[in-house]
Amino acid sequence: MLTIQKMSQVTGLSTHTLRYYEKIGLISSIRRKENGYRLYSEADIVWVEFLNRLRAIGMPIQQMQEYAALRMKGDETITQRRKMLEDYNQQVQQQLFEVKQNLSAIQDKIKLYRKMEEEYERSKGLNRLIEGS
């Protein structure tokens, strides 16, 4: 069992964010000591790491809340959760495709500028030769 400070270190989330996630329902069923301090389990670590992955790929908090709510309902929502992840996976795949296209266009522009720089430098050298003659 981990304290909130240890959980913060393990997951990379601030203690504020962990409390916020609990408040909005992303994290539930956190055990507490007699003094009220939170205690996180291995299962909580795995869940928070999954939440971190969802955030890293840009899933909105509201969608994460929907997913968490389904998860709390148990195995009867497995199909709904799978479909939700498949839908989001498709969105991310589309975004990746668009990013790759845009990155390719930028790389082409960089190549063009390098070529233009080389031509410019050659023309400056030729101009110096012509002027020096």
Image: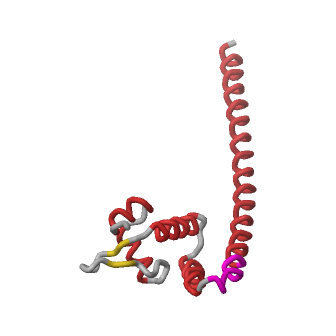
Q: Is residue 133 left or right of residue 5?
A: right
Percent across and percent down for residue 38 are 34, 75
Is residue 98 inside the magenta stretch?
A: no
* Magenta stretch: helix, strand or loop mostly: helix
Percent across and percent down for residue 19 are 38, 76
Give the total number of marks visible in the rendering.
0
Is residue 78 inside the magenta stretch?
A: yes
Occupied quadrant, residue 87: bottom right
Task: Work out whether residue 40 or residue 105 is closer to the camera in this orientation and state it.
Answer: 40
Q: Residue at x 66, y 20 (%)?
A: 128
Percent across and percent down for residue 73 are 58, 87
| Image: magenta residue range | 75-83
Residue 120 lies, with reference to residue 34, above or below; the image says: above
Residue 108 lies, with reference to residue 30, above or below; the image says: above
Occupied quadrant, residue 112: top right
Q: Quadrant of the N terminus?
A: bottom left
Q: Is residue 23 left or right of residue 85?
A: left
Q: Residue at x 64, y 82 (%)?
A: 75
Percent across and percent down for residue 126 are 71, 21
**Farthest left residue?**
35
Task: Work out whether residue 96 or residue 118 is closer to the camera in this orientation and state it.
Answer: 96
Q: Is residue 8 left or right of residue 102?
A: left
**Farthest top residue?**
133
Occupied quadrant, residue 100: bottom right
Residue 88 lies, with reference to residue 113, above or below; the image says: below
Q: Residue at x 73, y 61 (%)?
A: 98
